[in-house]
Image: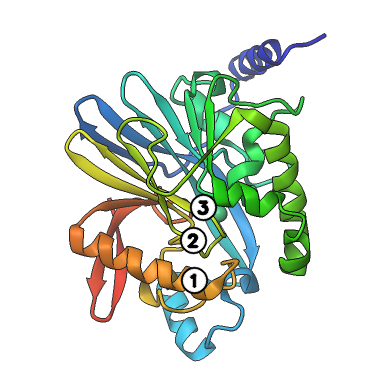
Amino acid sequence: MISRRLFVLSAAAGTILTGTPLRVWAGSTLDLGGGVRIDTLSDGHLELPFDFSFAGLPRDELDPILQQAGVTGDMIHSPCNITLLRDGTNTVLFDAGSGPDFMPTAGKVTEALAALDLTPEDVTHLLFTHGHPDHLWGVLDDFDEPLFANAAHVMGRAEAEYWTDPATLGSIRDDRQSFVAGASRRIEALGDALALIEDGESPLPGVTARLTPGHTAGHMSFDIDAGGQRVLVVGDAIANSHIAFARPEWESAADEDAALGARTRVALLGDLADSGTQLIGFHLSDGGIGRAERNGDSFRFVPG
Ligand SMILES: [Zn+2]
């Protein structure tokens, strides 16, 4: 029987023999000092119907913002940035990506790790911001075993309970029923291997979970405090580079609880802009690392 390790090695050897070029993507790197480094890895991108994020928004105000951001057409191209934190001891991933079962354009994190000479087995901690497909579905391999076999898996308790609560199937939007089936299957497959944490807990030294609900019920951001710098991994609490900054108070159809999502976003952006803290957004442009700056009554995303 072919083992997972043998299969991965064979695949890597095949890549070398055939000379298939590595994928090119926009990642970014942040050196925090003290031997601590953050890279964002591209898991690929999503192609989302326009209404997934923008249903119900006023087109007369929305269209100029999208036009300025170069967003056109009926499908929205949404990059997926997985944050990788390395401190010389720990190799920490924030979210697992889509895996092969969500969209053909996503689920590429293993390739992105390989470009840094890393394998999924090298990951020591896998911290989930939330249970949507593009963040959670990559957690299991083709054998339905944890792909990141040596990692401590961590998710917010409220988030895990939301996706495994039988009532969620009845309350979630019709077009997201598959999200519930996909998340509950994976959370249940992980079982005791998934540690559940509360707001304010630290899954490892220098990383603190911060409840940022609305996009999902128990969405967590992660505050990284290392090398004398702070960086906030915001997941999908701030979910795109244009509307989320230009009109954070708009209720987004991408959020499970749109009103709560908007309140969380406004508060987070105010904190980030006023403190000058760097942020990393899973779906933000330019690899996702940047700052929020005040821009009159709203904000703008400044990559870098
Ligand atoms: Zn997402």
Where 195 sits versus 254, above or below?
Answer: above
Do the numbered discs 2 and 3 sit on residues whose CB atoms are within 8 Å? no
Query: Does the beta carbon at disc 3 come under 8 Å from ligand 1?
Result: no
Q: Determine whether the residue tagged by mark 1 lies in a helix, strand or loop.
A: helix
Q: Do we see residue 220 in this rendering?
A: yes
- Residue 264: give x, y in percent of width and height: 41, 67
Q: Earlier in the sequence, mark 2 or mark 1?
A: 2
Where 123 sits versus 31, above or below?
Answer: above
Do the numbered discs 2 and 1 sit on residues whose CB atoms are within 8 Å? yes
Who's the residue at 51% across and 76% down the image? 259
Write down the residue under mark 1: 260
Spatial CA distance of label 2 from label 3 is: 22 Å
- Which label belongs to residue 213? 2
Colouring of the image: rainbow
- Give neighbour class at mark 2: few <14, some 14-19, many 20+ (Cα, 10 Å): many
Write down the residue under mark 3: 79
Q: Earlier in the sequence, mark 1 or mark 3?
A: 3
